[in-house]
Amino acid sequence: MDSFLIQGGTRLQGEVTISGSKNAVLPIMAATLLTADTCVIRRVPDLSDVRFMCDILKSLGAEVQFEDGTLTIRAALIRGHGDYELIRKMRGSICILGPLLARLRKAHVSLPGGCVIGTRPIDLHLKGIRALGAKLQIQNGYIRATARQLEGTMIFLGGRAGPTVLGTANVMMAATLAEGVTVIESAACEPEVTDLAHFLNSMGARITGIGSPTITITGVKELHGTQHEVIPDRIEAATFACAVAATGGEITIRGARPDHFHAVLDKLIEAGVKIDQRKSGMVVKPTSRLKAVDVTTLPYAGFPTDVQAQIMAFMCVVPGISVITERIFESRFMHVAELARLGADISIEGPSAIVKGGAPLSGAPVMASDLRASAALVIAGMTARGSTKVNRIYHLDRGYERMEEKLRRLGAQIERVEGE
Ligand code: UD1
């Protein structure tokens, strides 16, 4: 398993270009199963999760080509039975359920895996798919879904922690080919869901209320091929912004959409980071007057849970006390113990982590537990004195395209150590 070796203490300086969004492209790839025509998707990040999804689509019978950031997918003849092991490995794979069911009226999909960030139920996905008229059975680790005809209806998709991102994606995709009108209430408003809805409309779907909590889908008989460019990855952009905030320096983030992560930018500004929108991109530079801020993760447009670990790493180096509250996933604090190995002073009280920042961090071997926790450890490692080894960075490779190269170009001393 690869690891990163980081020599801390270097300020980040220069320009970084943001890749296409992982969380947008995965459901969009699944949506290509809704048509027998060719779909071309651009600005696709080269990530292990994307490669996994390519393999899943191939295992269903689709032809998939991935070259220079462009995916060409033709799902002319497909079967409803995916590879158990492949699907189990990746949480995002659950969103093949809706399209398979809509296209074939049957789907046989294994229960998904993914990051270890708490129990991740799929009850809302199943509730929505059932409401459309499908019969569902869970047996031997598989979901078996069948439907003679999917029928539009009103579906409330709010859960204990608010809306569900992939659940909304799944039900929205299934409803595109249903008979009649489906209304999803308490739909997720994340930009990735919006991007999927635009993709579906470009295939001939009839979706309105895009980006709002009420999405209306008028079913159509069939969908056709299309071309689409994926939105930039707001979580990657936010990660680089937190990184420079923590290390010091000044970077220009190119290609990001600031309107997609206002909550993060707002917190960084409150913490004393200067953010300027210029033609060349977003210039991010911490001032000399940094202060601790409190953060609570919420559904979009609130502060994203996927940036909670990274802002915590930043708060570790800012003098003062910061309370970071996780409202989306319970036990998404796996990075806390690892940050503590670097000398961070963090205690957990219920859903909150209390960070006493400002004490200097010192390098140590640490273990990445999930995708965003890995990013937090890289940020902390870059601020620590001495060398930090981040083990198990396959988590990071799932969601960040060439992260070490991008950081090296910004002056970080980071290298990949292969296969240890
Ligand atoms: C997606 C993102 C993930 C992000 C998360 C929240 C992808 C591939 N992953 O995950 O990076 O952290 O959104 O922004 O896009 N829930 C239920 N029942 C369900 C589904 C979810 O109770 O059927 C709960 C979850 O446990 C969690 C909350 O709803 O507490 C939000 O989860 P959800 O939005 O579904 O996350 P994902 O779509 O899996």
Image (spheres, helix red, strand yellow):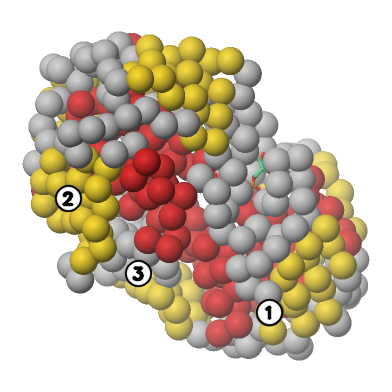
Closer to the camera: disc 1 or disc 2? Answer: 2
Residue behind mark 1: 207
**Does residue 403 appear left or right of residue 157 in this picture?**
left
Q: Earlier in the sequence, mark 1 or mark 2?
A: 1
Closer to the camera: disc 3 or disc 2? Answer: 2
What secondary structure is found at the residue carrying circle 1?
strand
Q: Earlier in the sequence, mark 3 or mark 2?
A: 3
Front in this rendered view, residue 219 or 211: 211
Residue behind mark 3: 43
Q: Examine the image and state in which quarter residue 128 appears.
A: bottom right
The residue under the point 48% across, 18% down is: 354
Label 1, label 3: how many angstroms apart (C-alpha)? 23 Å
Q: Hey, what amino acid is under mark 2?
A: Ile
The dot on residue 251 is: 2
Q: Hey, what amino acid is under mark 3?
A: Arg
Marks 3 & 2, CB-CB < 8 Å contact: no
Q: Is residue 3 visible?
A: no
**Does residue 66 appear left or right of residue 382 in this picture?**
right
Count residues near mark 1 (Cα–Cα under 10 Å), then give few for <14, some for 14-19, many for 20+: many
> Which quarter of the figure is the N terminus placed in?
top left
Label 3, label 2: how many angstroms apart (C-alpha)? 22 Å
Q: Hey, what amino acid is under mark 1?
A: Ile
Q: Position of residue 244 (x, y in %)?
A: 22, 41
